[in-house]
Image (cartoon, helix red, strand yellow):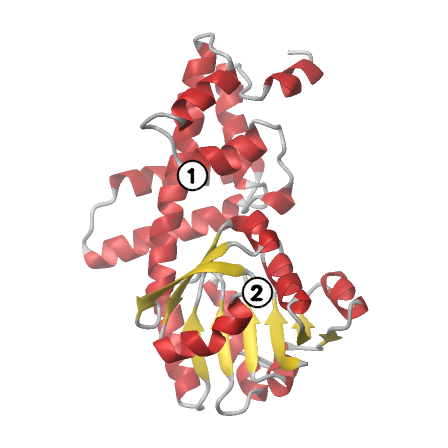
Amino acid sequence: MKETVGFIGLGTIGGPMAWRVLQGGYQMVVYDVRPEAMKRFVEKGAKGASSPRDVGAQCKAVLLSLPDSPIIEQVILGKSGIAEGAAPGTLIVDLSSAHPASTIKIGKELAAKGIDFIDAPVSGGAAGATAGTLSVMVGGKKDLMEKAKPVLMTFGKTFFHCGELGSGDTIKAANNFLSAMCFIGTGEAMILAVKAGLDPQTALDVIQASSGGSKAGNGRFRELVMKGDFDKAKSMSMYLFHKDLSTAMDLATKLGVPMFLAAMTQQLLAHGITQIGAEAPSSAHIRLMEQAVGVKVRNRDVLEKEGR
């Protein structure tokens, strides 16, 4: 039996990652603020914890997948946090999309306690987590990345050591800006084509086979928007995407880097939040554009089913 691994945060992406760890043969201690999220893991042999501190006290390696930096700081350093229970030499791996400044702060406080810490945000969404094909971008000591790699390989396929602590979070923010921009840009191009009378499937096939194609267009756009699938469990929320754009803009401001497209994309997502809510799937942003123009960008069978 392999070593015991803790996992905190069993949400849209954290849940599938934790499931891959459990299937990989690791003993697990899991925690989530929602007891129902822990239930299926406990039923399959994992141990449910009462708090992050409880996880830290039982495991030499703890993985986190949480919404934002304030929550991450609370879970690690706050009352009943991991640091209260973890012994020196414990390795904490943050798989979340966090702010680099917060990550560095956490790292310094943990180092004073003899606890190791790396940031290792992932890319590939819930589908990639389920399939075990995520990209993992690591910041921190390379030897700690190698130490964590066996468990990370249960859900990750491609690994990058990006540099010092916080560098994984930095490139994740840059990547998510580009992903959001490409997704929204694909939506605008598609709506233009459909409004002009083109068939949606044909239009997307042409774009994806041409210079305007992107992974966002062939991924979430084709697999979710074109199929009319706006399930919250399959797409990052509007809030989380906007949060990552805000991280990118904050870094840009501090470094004196002009990012005109990032600022525009951030505002488009902010508008989406006011219109359809922070917890709405980010893929649903296309619906706002569709409503404004009076067209639907869907596969033929979906349009036929909807009578349009």
- Foreground pick, 154 / 140: 154
**Which residue lies at the image location 41% right of the left edge and 79% below the top edge?**
144
Callout 1: 10 Å neighbours few (<14), some, many (20+)? Answer: few
**Relative to residue 80, is residue 236 depicted above or below?**
above
25 sits to left or right of 242: right
Q: Element type at marker 2?
A: loop
Task: Give the position of the N terminus as an image quadrant.
Answer: bottom right
**Which residue lies at the image location 44% right of the left edge and 39% below the top edge?**
269
Callout 2: 10 Å neighbours few (<14), some, many (20+)? Answer: many
From the top left corner, tell me how far across and down residue 139 is, in percent.
36, 69
Give the labeled residue for mark 1: 215
Distance between the alpha carbons at the discs numbered 1 and 2: 23 Å
**Which residue lies at the image location 35% right of the left edge and 43% below the top edge?**
178
Q: Can you tell which quarter of the image residue 47 is in?
A: bottom right
41 sits to left or right of 119: right
Instruction: Indicate which label's residue lies in the foreground, 1 or 2.
Output: 2
- Foreground pick, 262 / 222: 222
From the top left corner, tell me how far across and down residue 201 is, in percent.
52, 19
- Foreground pick, 27 / 304: 27
**The furthest residue to the right:** 43
Give the labeled residue for mark 2: 154
From the top left corner, tell me how far across and down residue 293 is, in percent.
48, 16
Q: Element type at marker 1?
A: helix
Circle 1: residue type: Lys
42 sits to left or right of 97: right
**Relative to residue 89, is residue 297 depicted above or below?**
above
Q: Can you tell which quarter of the image residue 37 is in?
A: bottom right
